[in-house]
Image: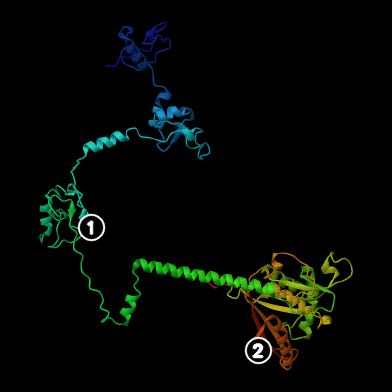
Amino acid sequence: MSIIPPASLQAENSTFTTNSSKTMPTSSKVRPRGGAVASPSYINTASDKSKALQRSKWPTAAEQRPPPKKDKRSIAWASTNEHSDPESARADNGYGAAKHRKGDRGYQLADWNGDWAPAPVDWDIRPSFQDSDFLDSVEIWRKGSEASIENMDITDFENYDEELVPHAWIPKSINGRPPQVWWNYHLSPTPIPGDVEPEIPLGPESMPFWLTFTSPTSQYIAQPPTPEVDGINPDEEDAKQSQARIKDYGSHDAAVFYINKQLRRKNRKSERRKQERTTVEERKTNYVAPINPHQPKVNIYLRPAFPGDMQQIKSIYNHHVQFTVFCPEGRPRTAHQMLERFQDIAENKLPFLVAVERGGGNINRKLQQVDKVVGFAYADDYNDINGMYRYAAELEVFTHPEYFMKGVAKCLMDKMMYLLDPDYVERGGYPFLGDGPHLGSGGGRVIGTVMCHVPYDAENPNRITWVAKWLGQWSFEKIGDIPNLGIKLNRHVNLAIFHMKTGARIDPRKAM
């Protein structure tokens, strides 16, 4: 039974002698566990005394707490100070200290934030890992493996077209049977149950490779005869077979032919693009702009429109709304409505220009408040910027009634075509104030087609004849004429449609 000291037993001023030179005091009270009483004389040896002392205590809270579980997923780098010496690292083949092999590395992969911790600073001088037992394991494997080494006579170079097969490759048994027995069973009509079916069906004429050696001592096996293939008789083939035979270049020649064909196509395409660029550059370089027959007869300059210009632009536009058939509206527009139109055009990166007559004062002051707008022109989306007509724009030009036939519209058209057509060379003859990438050749957006819708009085066809000649200076062509489409000012109104193609190159496969 258990021998437990009583509660009243106190070992005062006594010591237990152990293997070490130190002594363990026992002046503390011994807590009871129940049972009989153990006299001090029971403790004879140092080890017995130590065990008895351990049994003489109740377990503490720390002792009752279960040991912490080790995180098997945690991986640690080798401690920096353990491999500070490269020579010591080479001595253990990159393993590190013995405790590294046990998994306790002391240098965690993750920092306090859960991110990757930096590698130890001496990693760049550490040797690569080497397994010192690798060669020993290879030697053990070699000695434990069955090897068949034979002297092979391969000096018979006349059989260079045959296959060299060592006799050691002949299996000793297949599925527990001699090779020839296994082979004969598989040639039988009913295979033996449990045998593996061959991937290739075997016929009566099939022979195992160990029976095809050219001689019992030879290491060469005879090659199967090449089957004879009858070719096409040219005298019996039809036209289709003849063309197929002539164009049959074989796999290698066909691949080379296809590659060369692709290269020729790529070179032709590259040469065509180079020629197009050269043609455009030469045309721009050698182009001599004709003398503008409509040089402005007033002191004007052109510039981009400002929101402050909308009041004067509204006045010009409403004159054509009220007194001409050139605008489809029947009621005057407000400055706010013109501002909304201006904002939509600017947002869609299309040009909106004004022709301004110089007024008094400094031109560098607020131009829209000092100078007088005598004409304006703008290009708007033909339908919708996100639709299929996104590369088409509609051009409109309006002049102040007091400045008709003074070259104002001519200057506006010249500059607008420069901003819409990348191949157009402006003729000039007027100053232009403004700078920016959207004011260069081609403007800020790619436009492929420019449209002009010109309403005119059905009773005055001479008017549209003059307009067609005037627009023809910029390569516009009349492509349609709709009679009696509208009614305004007690007249029938026809609609003439003009269009021109710009020099922009648009690939429809990549346009949307």
- Say which of 136 and 95 sits in front: 136
Q: Quadrant of the N terminus?
A: top left
Establish if 381 lies above or below 131.
Answer: below
Write down the residue under mark 2: 481
Horizontal arrangement in the rendering, residue 17 relative to residue 180 (left or right): right
What x and y, as percent, mark residue 417? 70, 75
- The amino acid at mark 2 is Asp
- Contact flag, marks 1 and 2 (Cβ < 8 Å): no
Closer to viewer: mark 1 or mark 2: 1
Circle 2 crowding by C-alpha within 10 Å: few under 14, some 14–19, many from 20: some
Q: Does the rendering let one see residue 244?
A: yes
Secondary structure of the residue carrying tag 1 is: loop
Q: Residue at x 25, y 74 (%)?
A: 231
Horizontal arrangement in the rendering, residue 106 relative to residue 289 (left or right): left
Q: Residue at x 55, y 70 (%)?
A: 271
Horizontal arrangement in the rendering, residue 269 relative to residue 361 (left or right): left
Mark 1 or mark 2: name the one nearer the start of the chain: 1
Write down the residue under mark 1: 161
Q: Quadrant of residue 104?
A: top left
Q: Quadrant of residue 402?
A: bottom right
What x and y, as percent, mark residue 489? 75, 89
